[in-house]
Amino acid sequence: MESDTSFLLIGALATQANTTKDTIRHYDEMGLLKSRKRQAGSRLYTEFHPECIERIKMIKGAQAIGFTLNEFKRHLNDYFNGTPLNIDKELITISEKLTEAKRQKTEIINTINQLSACYTILEEIKSDNIGFISKSEWEKRIAAHLSLT
């Protein structure tokens, strides 16, 4: 059994992992973190294994590349338990995430193009000292601008 000093209280873990207590509680409830309960008088404290700092960094990294907490939970626990990777299964998982990221990239590029078109048209209208524009004129200008790009 590890000594009491090796475990972290939630505030210390939150500070060291650069996250919030609420996030830690959520991860703990989902089984993503290793914790234990300790009775201190009439209070019950949840203490966290120091490994949780690394776990939180991995969770945040996985979320940044598109994994949900539920999707990543098995990977995280397998990693820390030393379970060998099933390469074929991992390739499929990563391929699916890559496909989704490419789809999102296309959507973002389309959004940027549409916003750029709107901005350019509004700048043109402003330089012509036009305060208002009709819906049909707006649609005509947008269509013309988008067909040029």
Image (cartoon, grey):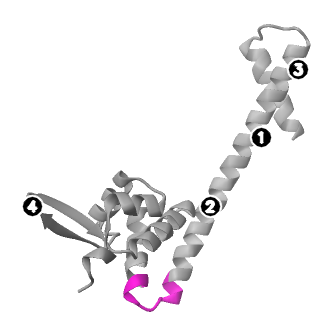
Residue wearing tag 1? 113
Q: Residue at x 70, y 41 (%)?
A: 111
User: Which mark sits nearer the N-terminus, 4 or 1?
Assistant: 4
For badge 4, the amino acid type reads Gly
Quarter occupied by residue 147: top right
Magenta stretch: residue 38 in it? no
Residue 124: numbered disc: 3
Q: Is residue 80 magenta?
A: yes
Pointer 1 local density, CA inside 10 Å: few below 14, some 14–19, many at least 20: some
Q: Quadrant of residue 136?
A: top right
Circle number at residue 41: 4
Q: Nearer the viewer, mark 3 or mark 4?
A: 4
Q: Position of residue 16 (x, y in %)?
A: 46, 63
Q: Secondary structure at mark 1?
A: helix
Q: Nearer the viewer, mark 2 or mark 4?
A: 4
Q: CA distance from mark 3 to mark 2?
A: 34 Å
**Sequence-wise first label, 1 or 2:** 2
Give the Cα separation between the discs numbered 2 and 4.
50 Å
Vertical side of 102 occupied by 31: above or below: below
Give the residues in magenta.
Answer: 79-89
Say which of 99 and 9 sits in front: 9
Residue type at tag 2: Ala
The x and y percentages for residue 117 are 80, 32
Q: Secondary structure at mark 3?
A: helix
